[in-house]
Image (cartoon, coloured by chain):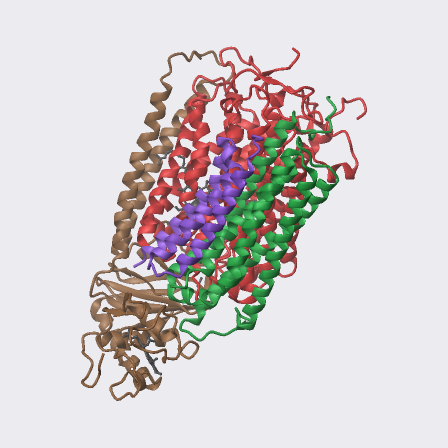
C-alpha cells in the first residue's frame, strides 16, 4: 500500500463534489424524466461512490490488486442482479 | 515426550489448545469438530437407510424421517464438507506449503473455529429441541410459514457458521497473496494452493448472500413480513434464486479443495511433474468464476422463465469443461510415471473414477429437458453423493492419510489403509449406483415411503451403506491407534517435494527454523530414477 | 415383490426425453471408457519398480490440451442444443389441448376438468390427445410429477404454472409430488389413468357435472361480482365481456394482457395498478374464495372472451 | 527463532507485509459486505421491477427532509474521517483525535436523525405488521417496500453503530499516542470501513427516498 499523503485540496474538492452531487440528485428526483429518473439517480450514486472509493479510500493511489479487490464485490453483485432480473424480465 | 524436539504438539494444557492461534492446532481443532458433526449426520443417514428398507416401513415417523434428512443435509454440507478440506487440511498445510509461519490473521482463524462451533451448537440445539423438517434447502413458503420446529435456531446456526467460512476464506486469500516465502511465485505454488485460493473466492463472495437470505427467512418466520411469501405479496422463486446463488458455488467449495488434494497425490505417487500445470491451476479459477453463473439449473422446473432456464443450462455445460481439463491432465500425469499404490493414491484413483461419474451425471441434469424428469428424484441424490462422497470425502481421506505423518508424527498402518480404501469404494458404489436407477424410475427424494416396485434398489443401497459405514469406521480406529502405537514418521516419508515436507514431523511451532527460499517449480519428481526428487526450496543458510 | 428396471414410457414427451437420456448415457459411457482405459493401462504399465521407458521428451502437451478442451466443448454444445430444443417444445402447449385445472394442497391433489368433472389424487385422460394442466397451490410449493410421461412442473402458490403432454399408452401410472412440502409429502401421490378416447368421454359424462364455466357463472352471481360488473350495476366497474386474452389499459399508462394470472390478481386485489379510468372500489376476495373457485371464475371470464358487453355499458 | 519485534506480529516478516495484509484484508471484508447488502438490493430490485406503482407510492411516504440531511451528515463524516487518516499519516496526534471525534459525532447525529425518522414512520403507521395502514391500492406490496426499508436501514444503522464504537476506540488509541505516522494502520483500516458504510447509504438514499417524486 502506498503511503501517499493526499493533499488537503483533493479532499476538499472531493467533499464539495459529493455535496453538489447530493443536491443534484435531490433536485433531479423532482423533475419528471420518466424512466430516466431511476437511471439518473443511480448514475449519480455510482459517481458518488466512485469518488469516495478513489479519493477517500485511497484506491487511486493503491495497487492494481486493490482495484481488483474493490471491484470484485460490485462485479459479483452485478452478476446476481442481472441474472435474477433476466429471469423476471423474460417470464411469459 | 521430553526426549522429542519441541514441536507444535509439545504443550499439553487444555488452555494452550483453546487459546491457540497456531494454524496447525486450529486445523486439528477443526478436525475434531467435523468428526463429531459427521458422526451425527452419518447416524442420521443410517437411520434413513434403515427406514427405506421397506416400502412402508414404520421404523420412524414421517416427521422424524423429514427431520433426519434435514439434519443429515445441514450437518453434512455446512458442518462437515465445507470445512473438511479447507479448514482442516488447508489450515494445516497452506502456511507450510507457501513457506509462512502462520496464516495472515491467526486470531481471526481461532475466532472462526469458535464461531463454527457456536453455529454447530445452535444447529444441534434446534435438533434436540425437536428438530427441523425443511430440508437443507429451506424452501419458502414452507420454511417461513408452514414448517414445524425450530427453523430459526437452525438458520442462526448456519448463519453463524457462515461467518466462520468467510473468515477462513478471507484468511486464505490474504495469506496466499501476502505470506509467500521468497521465491514462491504464483506459478511455483502447489496446485492445492491454487484450488484453495479459488475456493476462498467463493467462500468470501457467496457466503454473505446466504447469510442475508437466511436472515430474511428468520425475519419472515418470526414476524410474518417478507419478500418470499406469495401471501404477503412476495415471491418464493426469488428465495430460490438467492439460495442457489450461494449454494451452487458452494458445491464447488465442496469439490475444488478435493481436486487440489488429488493433484498433490497424483504427482507424488506417480513421481511425476503434473501434466499441464497452468491448465490445472487456471481451471480452478475458471470453475470458481463460471460456477457463479449456473445456479438456475436447480430451478429448471420452478417456474423460472424458459429463457433463463436455457441460459443456465448452457452455462452448466460450459462449467464442466474446466473439470474435464483436470481429469484429462491427471490421467496424462500418470503416463510414464512410476506409480505406487499407497493408500492416498488409492483414494485419488477412487476420486477420479467417482467424480467423473458424478460429473457426467451432472450433465444429464444440466440437459434441461432431461432434468424435467430427473429433478428431485434419487438421480439427483446419486449425482451429488457421487461427487460429494465419492469425490470430496474420498479426497479428504486421501489427504488425511497423506499428511497424517506430518500432522501426528506417526505412520498409519499401510495395509489397513488399503483395505479401508477398497471397502469404502465398494460400499460406496453399492450404496449409490442403484440410486441412479431409482431416480430414473421416478422415485422422488425426501420420501419416507415408496411404491413396492422400487424396493430392490433401496435394499441394495442400504446394504451398501452398511459396508460404506465400515469403510469410514476403519480409518477412525487405526488413526487413533497410530497416535500411540504407530511407527514414528520421518520428516518426509513420501519423498515429496513440497515445503511442508522440509520441516520436521510434527512441524515446529512456527513451521520452519528459517523461512525457506524457493528455487523451483513444485513437483520436480524424477520418475526415471525414483525415489529421487528435488525439494522445492533450499534452507536459507545451506 | 415386483421389480422394474425402467419406467413405462407412456407419452410423446417420454420418448423424446428418453432418446436424450440414453444418448447422454451412451456418450457418458464412451467418455468413461476413454478415460478409465488409459488410466488403468498407465496404472499397470508404469507401476513402480517396473522397467519401462519413462523418457518424456518431445511430448506435445499443448496440442493435447487444446484437443481435450475443444472436443468436449463441441460435444456439450450439441447436447445442449438438442435438450434445449426438446425443452422448448415441452414448454409450449399446442392450442386446443384438453384443459384440466390442478390445485395442490398439503397433502392432496384436487383436479377439475373444464367439463366440470372433479377428482382427487386421480387424473383421467384420453390417449392420443394433448392435455394441458393449469396448476396452482393453496399453501406451499408442490410439484406434479408423472414419471411415465417424464414430465414435472412445480406448483407454486400465488401463480399459475402449466404442463402438457400427449399420452400414448393406456394404463395406470404414478403421480408423485416431487417438491418437498412437509410431513406427508410422500403421501401426496396418486394415479393417472390413460383411457381410450371413447372410454374417457363416457367417464367424463358420469354424474353429468356442470362445466367449469357454468359453475363460475353461478359464483359470479353468488359472490356479488355481477352486482358491479353486470349491466344493471350502478357502480362504475368495467365489463368483463371480451377482456380475456386482450390488452387492458392500466392507470399507469401501461398495458397488460388479461390472462389467468391477471384475473386472479384482480379477484385478490394483488394486481399492480387499477384499470385506467376506474376507482379503487373492488374489494379483495382474499380469504373468501378458494383456489378452485378462482379457477372457475377464470373459466367463466374466459368463456365470455368472444362476446361483447351488452348495450348500456360504456367502456 | 527470531524474536518477533514489537512493530509487527510474529507471523509476518516485516511491518510492510503486515500493513499490506491488513489493508487487503479489509478490502476483502468490504467485498463480502457488498454482497451482504447486495442480497437485499436484489430483493429490492425485484420488488421495484414487479410492483413499480406500489413501490413509488410507498417511497413517497418517506421524507427527503430526513434522508437528505442525513446523507449530508454522512458525507461530512466521511470527509472528517479522510482528514483524520491524513492527520495520522502526518503524525498529528491532536488533529487525528479531533477529526475522529468529529466523525463519531456525525455518526451519532445520523443515528439520532434516523431515530426521529423511525418515530415519524411509526406515527404515520408505516411499520409493517405492527403498525401499518395503507389507503392506496396494493397495500401488500407497499408493505413489502417498508419491510425492505426497515431491514435495509436497520442493518445500515447497525453498521453505523459498530463504526461509532470502533472509531471511539481508535480515538482513544490515538489519544494515548498508539497511532503514529509510521504505524497508522488502525486509523486507515477503520477509515475504510467507515467510508464503506457511507457508500451503502449513498445507494440507499436514492433507492428508498427518491423514486416516488415525479
Ligand atoms: C460437490 C458438489 C457438486 C459438484 C462439484 C457438482 C457439479 C455439477 N453439478 Fe451438481 N449438485 C450437487 C452437488 C454438486 N454438483 C448437489 C448437492 C445437488 C442437489 C442440491 C439439492 O437439490 O439438494 C446438485 C444438483 C445438480 C443439478 C440440479 C438437479 C435438480 O435438482 O434438478 C444440476 C443440474 O444441472 C447439477 C449439475 C451439475 C454439473 C453440470 C456439474 C459439473 O460441475 C460437473 C463437471 C464434471 C464433469 C462433467 C466430469 C469430468 C469431466 C470429464 C470426465 C470430461 C469429459 C466430459 C465430457 C466430454 C462431457 N447438479
Ligand atoms: C457431505 C455430504 C454428504 C455425505 C458424506 C453423505 C453421506 C451419506 N448420505 Fe447423504 N445427503 C447429503 C449429503 C451427504 N450425504 C445431502 C446434502 C442430502 C440432501 C438432504 C436434503 O434432502 O435436504 C443427502 C440426502 C441423502 C439421502 C436422501 C434422503 C431423501 O431424499 O429422502 C440419502 C438416502 O439414501 C442419503 C444417504 C447417505 C448415505 C448412505 C451416506 C453415507 O456416506 C453415510 C455412511 C455412514 C453410515 C451408514 C453410518 C455409520 C455406519 C454404521 C453405524 C454401520 C451400520 C449402518 C447401517 C446398518 C446402515 N443422503
Ligand atoms: Cu406436495 Cu410434496
Ligand atoms: Cu448446482
Q: Which chain is purple?
A: A
Chain B colour is red
x, y percent for residue C12: 25, 55
Rendered position, C209 above or below B428: below
Picture residue at 37% right of the left edge, 57% below the top: A37
Residue B439 appears in view: no
* Rendered location of residue A76, percent (x, y): 45, 44
Q: Nearer the viewer, residue B539 or C233?
A: C233
What residue is shown at x 62% (from left), y 27% (from top)? D16
Of D154 and C221, nearer the camera is D154
Where does residue D44 sit, x and y in percent of width and height? 45, 58
Residue drawn at (30%, 36%) of the image = C75
Residue B535 in the figure: left or right of residue B504:
left
- Picture quadrant of residue B63: bottom right
Query: Color used for chain C?
Result: brown
**Residue farthest to the right?**
B2
Does any portion of residue D189 appear in the rendered image?
yes
Amino acid at each position: 500500500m502506498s503511503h501517499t499523503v493526499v493533499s488537503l485540496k483533493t479532499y476538499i474538492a472531493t467533499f464539495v463534489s459529493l455535496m453538489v452531487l447530493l443536491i443534484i440528485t435531490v433536485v433531479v428526483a423532482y423533475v419528471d424524466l420518466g424512466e430516466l429518473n431511476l437511471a439518473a439517480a443511480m448514475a449519480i450514486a455510482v459517481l458518488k461512490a466512485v469518488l469516495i472509493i478513489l479519493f477517500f479510500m485511497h484506491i487511486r493511489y493503491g495497487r492494481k490488486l486493490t482495484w481488483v479487490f474493490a471491484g470484485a464485490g460490485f462485479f459479483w453483485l452485478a452478476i446476481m442482479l442481472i441474472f435474477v432480473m433476466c429471469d423476471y424480465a423474460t417470464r411469459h | 515426550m521430553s526426549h522429542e524436539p519441541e514441536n507444535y504438539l509439545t504443550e499439553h494444557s487444555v488452555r494452550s489448545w483453546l487459546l491457540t492461534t497456531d494454524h496447525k492446532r486450529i486445523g486439528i481443532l477443526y478436525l475434531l469438530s467435523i468428526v463429531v458433526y459427521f458422526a451425527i449426520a452419518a447416524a442420521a443417514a443410517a437411520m434413513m437407510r434403515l427406514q427405506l428398507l421397506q416400502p412402508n416401513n414404520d421404523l420412524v415417523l414421517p416427521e422424524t424421517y423429514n427431520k433426519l434428512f434435514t439434519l443429515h443435509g445441514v450437518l453434512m454440507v455446512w458442518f462437515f464438507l465445507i470445512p473438511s478440506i479447507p479448514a482442516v487440511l488447508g489450515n494445516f498445510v497452506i502456511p507450510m506449503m507457501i513457506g509462512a509461519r502462520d496464516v495472515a490473521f491467526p486470531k481471526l482463524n481461532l475466532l472462526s473455529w469458535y464461531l463454527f462451533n457456536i453455529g454447530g451448537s445452535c444447529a444441534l440445539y434446534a435438533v434436540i429441541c425437536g428438530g427441523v423438517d425443511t430440508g437443507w434447502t429451506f424452501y419458502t413458503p414452507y420454511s417461513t410459514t408452514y414448517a414445524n420446529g425450530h427453523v430459526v435456531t437452525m438458520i442462526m446456526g448456519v448463519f453463524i457458521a457462515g461467518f466462520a467460512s468467510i473468515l477462513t476464506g478471507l484468511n486464505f486469500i490474504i495469506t496466499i497473496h501476502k505470506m509467500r516465502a521468497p521465491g514462491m511465485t504464483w506459478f511455483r505454488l502447489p496446485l492445492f494452493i491454487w484450488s484453495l485460493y479459488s475456493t476462498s473466492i467463493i467462500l468470501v463472495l457467496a457466503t454473505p448472500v446466504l447469510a442475508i437470505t437466511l436472515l430474511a427467512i428468520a425475519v419472515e418466520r418470526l414476524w410474518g413480513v417478507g419478500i418470499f411469501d406469495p401471501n404477503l405479496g412476495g415471491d418464493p422463486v426469488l428465495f430460490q434464486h438467492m439460495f442457489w446463488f450461494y449454494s451452487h458455488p458452494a458445491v464447488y467449495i465442496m469439490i475444488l479443495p478435493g481436486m487440489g488434494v488429488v493433484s498433490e497425490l497424483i504427482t507424488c505417487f506417480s513421481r511425476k511433474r503434473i501434466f499441464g500445470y497452468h491448465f490445472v491451476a487456471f481451471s480452478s479459477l475458471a470453475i470458481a468464476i463460471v460456477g457463479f453463473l449456473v445456479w438456475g439449473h436447480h430451478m429448471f422446473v420452478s417456474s423460472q422463465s424458459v429463457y433463463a432456464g436455457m441460459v443456465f443450462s448452457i452455462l452448466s455445460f460450459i462449467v464442466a469443461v474446466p473439470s474435464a481439463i483436470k481429469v484429462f491432465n491427471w490421467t496424462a500425469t500418470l503416463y510414464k510415471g512410476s506409480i505406487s499404490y499407497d493408500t492416498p493414491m488409492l483414494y485419488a484413483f477412487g476420486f477420479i473414477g467417482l467424480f467423473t461419474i458424478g460429473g457426467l451425471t451432472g450433465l444429464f441434469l444440466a440437459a434441461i429437458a432431461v432434468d424435467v424428469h430427473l429433478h428431485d428424484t434419487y438421480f439427483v441424490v446419486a449425482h451429488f453423493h457421487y461427487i460429494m462422497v465419492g469425490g470430496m470425502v474420498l479426497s479428504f481421506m486421501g489427504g488425511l492419510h497423506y499428511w497424517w505423518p506430518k500432522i501426528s508424527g506417526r505412520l498409519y498402518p499401510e495395509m489397513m489403509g488399503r483395505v479401508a480404501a477398497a471397502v469404502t469404494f465398494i460400499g460406496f458404489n453399492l450404496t449409490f449406483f442403484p440410486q441412479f436407477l431409482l431416480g430414473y424410475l421416478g422415485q422422488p427424494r425426501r420420501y419416507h415411503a415408496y411404491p413396492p416396485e422400487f424396493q430392490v434398489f433401496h435394499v441394495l443401497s442400504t446394504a451398501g451403506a452398511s459396508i460404506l459405514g465400515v469403510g469410514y469406521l476403519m480409518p477412525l480406529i487405526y488413526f487413533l491407534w497410530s497416535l500411540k502405537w504407530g511407527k514414528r514418521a520421518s520428516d518426509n516419508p513420501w519423498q515429496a517435494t513440497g515445503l511442508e515436507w522440509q520441516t520436521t514431523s510434527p512441524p515446529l511451532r512456527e513451521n520452519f527454523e528459517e523461512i525457506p527460499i524457493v528455487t523451483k517449480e513444485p513437483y520436480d519428481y524424477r520418475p526415471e530414477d525414483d525415489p529421487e526428487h528435488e525439494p522445492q526450496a533450499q534452507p536459507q543458510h545451506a | 415383490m415386483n421389480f422394474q428396471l425402467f419406467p413405462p414410457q407412456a407419452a410423446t414427451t417420454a420418448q423424446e426425453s428418453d432418446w436424450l437420456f440414453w444418448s447422454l448415457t451412451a456418450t457418458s459411457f464412451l467418455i468413461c471408457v476413454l478415460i478409465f482405459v488409459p488410466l488403468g493401462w498407465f496404472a499397470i504399465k508404469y507401476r513402480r519398480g517396473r522397467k519401462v521407458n519413462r523418457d518424456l521428451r518431445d511430448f506435445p502437451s499443448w496440442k493435447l490440451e487444446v484437443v481435450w478442451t475443444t472436443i468436449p466443448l463441441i460435444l456439450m454444445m450439441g447436447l445442449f442444443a438438442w435438450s434445449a430444443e426438446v425443452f422448448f417444445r415441452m414448454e409450449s402447449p399446442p392450442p386446443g389441448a384438453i384443459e384440466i385445472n390442478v390445485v395442490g394442497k398439503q397433502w392432496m391433489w384436487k383436479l377439475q376438468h373444464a367439463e366440470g368433472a372433479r377428482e382427487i389424487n386421480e387424473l383421467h385422460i384420453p390417449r392420443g390427445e394433448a392435455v394441458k394442466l393449469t396448476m396452482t397451490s393453496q399453501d406451499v410449493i408442490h410439484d406434479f410429477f408423472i414419471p411415465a410421461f417424464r414430465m414435472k412442473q412445480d406448483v407454486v402458490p400465488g401463480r399459475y404454472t402449466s404442463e402438457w403432454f400427449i399420452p400414448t399408452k393406456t394404463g395406470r401410472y404414478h403421480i408423485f409430488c416431487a417438491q418437498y412440502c412437509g410431513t406427508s409429502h410422500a403421501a401426496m401421490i396418486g394415479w393417472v389413468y390413460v383411457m381410450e378416447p371413447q372410454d374417457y368421454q363416457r367417464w367424463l359424462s358420469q354424474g353429468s357435472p356442470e362445466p367449469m364455466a357454468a359453475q363460475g357463472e353461478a359464483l359470479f352471481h353468488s359472490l356479488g361480482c355481477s352486482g358491479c360488473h353486470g349491466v344493471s350495476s350502478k357502480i362504475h366497474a368495467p365489463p368483463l365481456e371480451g377482456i380475456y386474452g386482450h390488452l387492458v389499459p392500466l392507470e399507469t399508462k401501461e398495458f397488460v394482457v388479461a390472462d389467468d394470472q391477471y384475473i386472479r390478481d384482480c379477484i385478490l386485489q394483488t394486481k399492480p395498478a387499477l384499470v385506467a379510468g376506474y376507482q379503487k372500489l373492488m374489494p379483495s376476495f382474499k380469504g373468501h374464495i378458494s383456489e378452485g373457485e378462482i379457477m372457475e371464475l377464470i373459466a367463466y371470464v374466459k368463456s365470455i372472451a368472444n362476446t361483447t358487453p351488452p348495450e348500456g355499458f360504456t367502456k | 527463532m527470531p524474536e518477533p519485534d514489537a512493530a509487527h506480529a510474529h507471523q509476518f516478516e516485516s511491518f510492510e507485509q503486515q500493513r499490506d495484509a491488513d489493508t487487503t484484508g479489509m478490502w476483502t471484508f468490504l467485498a463480502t459486505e457488498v454482497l451482504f447488502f447486495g442480497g437485499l438490493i436484489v430483493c429490492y430490485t425485484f420488488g421495484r421491477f414487479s410492483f413499480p406503482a406500489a413501490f413509488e407510492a410507498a417511497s413517497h411516504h418517506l421524507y427527503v427532509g430526513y434522508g437528505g440531511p442525513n446523507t449530508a451528515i454522512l458525507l461530512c463524516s466521511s470527509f472528517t474521517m479522510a482528514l483524520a487518516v491524513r492527520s495520522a499519516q502526518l503524525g498529528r496526534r491532536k488533529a487525528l483525535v479531533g477529526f475522529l471525534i468529529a466523525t463519531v459525532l456525525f455518526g451519532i447525529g445520523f443515528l439520532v436523525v434516523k431515530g426521529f425518522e423511525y418515530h415519524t414512520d411509526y406515527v404515520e403507521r408505516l411499520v409493517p405488521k405492527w403498525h401499518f395502514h395503507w389507503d392506496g391500492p396494493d397495500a401488500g406490496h407497499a408493505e413489502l417496500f417498508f419491510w425492505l426499508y426497515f431491514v435495509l436501514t436497520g442493518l445500515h444503522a447497525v453498521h453505523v453503530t459498530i463504526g461509532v464504537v470502533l472509531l471511539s476506540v481508535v480515538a482513544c488509541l490515538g489519544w494515548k499516542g498508539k497511532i503514529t505516522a509510521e504505524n497508522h494502520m488502525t486509523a486507515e483500516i477503520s477509515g475504510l470501513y467507515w467510508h464503506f458504510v457511507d457508500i451503502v447509504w449513498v445507494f440507499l438514499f436514492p433507492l428508498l427516498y427518491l423514486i416516488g417524486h415525479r
